[in-house]
Image (spheres, rainbow, N blue to C red):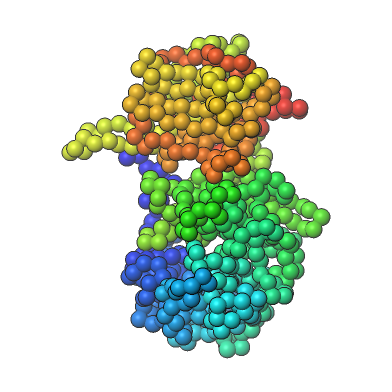
């Protein structure tokens, strides 16, 4: 089997007991990666859930045996985050069921026996780079908000948890907390984000003297935009160069929400659904962790799942938690606005996937190490660390300035010196799946191959059934690019035994206009995606997913020896490139920008 580093099984495992969550890393003064994790012998929320830490001195390849921050025999201890101070002390913040509550009431009646998201917010500290932790734990006072008073206990028992990385802002520390106003359908039925700011955590040696204030001002935290649902949780903070704060967080509305603070978290802009540019196309995301990190180069990386849709609130109780595979990554750059700096996001790339679409990965952390980038993630029973390929990261960071055509894997580039031919010799593309003769059962072998088509075209009409490209042989094997009944550009792959197809967003290709269409067939995650005029299709308002999966047992797309170009097309193909590998989104964007100059005129680069 060919190795694809985006496959989560290629990562290095972080040791745990059975259940494992939030493998978050702080770099200690002795050069170690210190990872805190919620773990237990059971499953999520089961008694025995507790906090451990482990250390790595080799960028996550190997880890020390975990040690307890809280023991499995004690009350539930969950959802830890780490903060290292400038003097080297490491703080570990987490939920602690100090009062040993054994059930909680649901707002619509009944109870939950899961008790890991309530109690007291506490911390312990380490002065030896995470080799040991203070015996005492110290409570963090959290101001009561409206959602606390309105819960079924009138605020006498509060619900909360945290997944957001703490920040250091000058001489202050800023922590994140997700308040829960009601337990019910989906477990958390109402949630909002607040922040805990400490003026002396970074310098005070006696933890009894550390103070905190709860932000924002007032009695309501960060919620969804007006008209949104009741879920606004797992806030992720990052700082901008002008001192502003950016916060992004999950909802069940099909999009993440975001807000900016210009005063250290005391007040926030009206939350909006996150978009690639201010007032631009909305980012799509389900009910899953979505984190943004500021990098040392002054740019940002953003983890999300790139699907959503308004139907999410209408799904069954646990539906919005699904489809956390694959993970997508954007880069962000700062831009000026009248209110201060804001973030513009790139088109996304697939970062990680698992072969089983039902496997979920989430709760990441980002680590930078001497110009290299790593992420951690968990599937709830296995946690791993992965290095982000520099080619992927650099492509994202430089996407706005990329105006070059990629030639790696280019096997056909037409029309060349003359007019576009009607026929062309079809290069042989790599097979996707074949028999493995080294196996005793002679079963199949996934070659994780792919290919990409890059087209400049104009369609005079979107009438269905137009054939733009075709390589099908007499047995039906090959590739067909056509127009669909939905007015889209569609690709169909056949190997003589089965077929797979996917199409672009409806409405994105307009009759009479010149368009750049890149079709990426990625044999790693088995995903087909379309990048049209430098924008990755995300399904828009028409469908939850803009990308689609093809059969993992599709054997080949090699068909006829000749490719037919525009055999039945009301329009014209101006340029055609064929690659014997999947293109990254950033490469497709670069190809588009290389071919555009002035008022949308095609320049063969």
Q: Is residue 292 visible?
A: no
| Residue depicted at x 44% and y 69% | 37
Instruction: Decide: is 357 above or below 30.
Output: above
| Residue depicted at x 46% and y 84% | 98
Q: Quadrant of the N terminus?
A: top left
Query: Outermost residue, right direction?
Result: 338
Query: Outermost residue, left direction?
Result: 440
Percent position (x, y) of residue 515?
65, 27
Q: Quadrant of the C terminus?
A: top right
Left or right relative to 330: residue 70: left
Percent position (x, y) of residue 400?
66, 41
Judge by depth and name the residue closer to the eye, 198 or 564. 564
Left or right relative to 217: residue 15: left
Judge by depth and name the residue closer to the eye, 329 or 282. 282
| Residue depicted at x 39% and y 16% | 473
Instruction: Decide: is 421 above or below 41.
Output: above
Specify the quadrant of the image occupied by residue 298.
bottom right
Left or right relative to 294: residue 478: left
| Residue depicted at x 53% and y 13% | 567
Query: Outermost residue, front direction?
Result: 109
Percent position (x, y) of residue 508?
64, 33
Left or right relative to 276: residue 73: left
Q: Is residue 261 visible?
A: yes
């Amino acid at each position: 089997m060919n190795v694809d580093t985006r496959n989560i099984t290629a990562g290095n495992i972080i040791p745990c007991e059975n259940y494992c969550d939030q493998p978050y890393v702080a770099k200690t003064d002795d050069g170690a990666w210190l990872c805190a994790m919620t773990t237990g012998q059971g499953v999520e929320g089961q008694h025995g859930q507790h906090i451990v830490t482990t250390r790595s001195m080799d960028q996550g390849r190997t880890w020390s045996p975990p040690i307890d921050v809280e023991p499995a025999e004690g009350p539930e201890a969950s959802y830890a985050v780490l903060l290292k101070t400038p003097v080297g002390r490491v703080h570990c913040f987490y939920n602690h069921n100090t009062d040993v509550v054994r059930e909680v009431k649901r707002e619509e009646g009944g109870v939950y026996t899961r008790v890991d998201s309530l109690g007291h917010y506490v911390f312990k500290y380490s002065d030896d780079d995470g080799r040991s932790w203070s015996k005492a734990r110290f409570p963090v006072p959290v101001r009561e908000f409206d959602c606390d008073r309105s819960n079924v206990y009138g605020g006498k028992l509060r619900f909360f948890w945290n997944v957001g990385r703490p920040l250091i802002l000058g001489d202050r520390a800023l922590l994140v907390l997700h308040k829960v106003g009601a337990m019910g359908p989906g477990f958390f039925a109402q949630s909002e984000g607040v922040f805990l700011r400490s003026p002396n955590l970074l310098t005070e040696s006696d933890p009894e003297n550390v103070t905190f204030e709860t932000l924002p001002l007032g009695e309501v935290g960060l919620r969804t935009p007006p008209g949104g649902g009741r879920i606004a949780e797992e806030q992720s903070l990052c700082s901008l160069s002008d001192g502003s704060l950016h916060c992004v967080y999950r909802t069940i509305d099909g999009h993440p929400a975001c807000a900016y603070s210009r005063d250290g978290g005391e007040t926030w802009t009206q939350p909006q659904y996150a978009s690639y540019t201010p007032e631009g196309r909305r980012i799509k995301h389900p009910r899953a962790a979505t984190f943004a990190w500021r990098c040392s180069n002054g740019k940002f990386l953003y983890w999300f799942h790139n699907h959503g849709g308004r139907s999410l609130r209408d799904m069954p109780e646990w539906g919005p938690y699904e489809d956390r595979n694959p993970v997508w990554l954007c880069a962000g750059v700062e831009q000026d606005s009248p209110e201060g700096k804001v973030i513009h996001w790139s088109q996304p790339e697939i970062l990680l996937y698992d072969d089983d679409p039902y496997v979920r990965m989430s709760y990441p952390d980002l680590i930078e190490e001497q110009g290299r980038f790593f992420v951690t993630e968990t599937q709830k029973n296995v946690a791993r660390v992965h290095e982000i390929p520099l080619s992927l990261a650099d492509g994202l960071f430089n996407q706005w300035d990329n105006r070059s055509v990629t030639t790696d894997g280019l096997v056909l580039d037409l029309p060349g010196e003359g007019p576009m031919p009607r026929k062309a010799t079809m290069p042989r593309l790599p097979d996707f799946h074949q028999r493995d003769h080294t196996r005793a059962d002679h079963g199949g072998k996934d070659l994780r191959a792919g290919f990409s088509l890059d087209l400049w075209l104009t369609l005079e009409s979107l009438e269905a059934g137009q054939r733009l490209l075709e390589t099908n042989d007499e047995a039906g094997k090959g590739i067909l690019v056509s127009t669909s009944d939905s007015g889209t550009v569609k690709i169909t792959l056949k190997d003589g035994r089965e077929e797979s197809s996917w199409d672009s967003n409806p409405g994105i290709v307009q009759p009479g206009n010149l368009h750049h269409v890149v079709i990426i067939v990625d044999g790693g995650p088995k995903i087909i995606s379309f990048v049209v005029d430098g924008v990755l299709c995300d399904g828009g308002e028409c469908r939850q997913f803009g990308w689609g999966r093809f059969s993992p047992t599709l054997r080949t797309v090699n068909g006829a020896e000749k490719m037919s170009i525009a055999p039945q097309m009301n329009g014209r193909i101006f340029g055609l490139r064929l690659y014997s590998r999947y293109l990254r989104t950033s490469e497709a964007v670069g190809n588009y920008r290389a071919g555009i100059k002035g008022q949308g005129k095609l320049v063969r680069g």
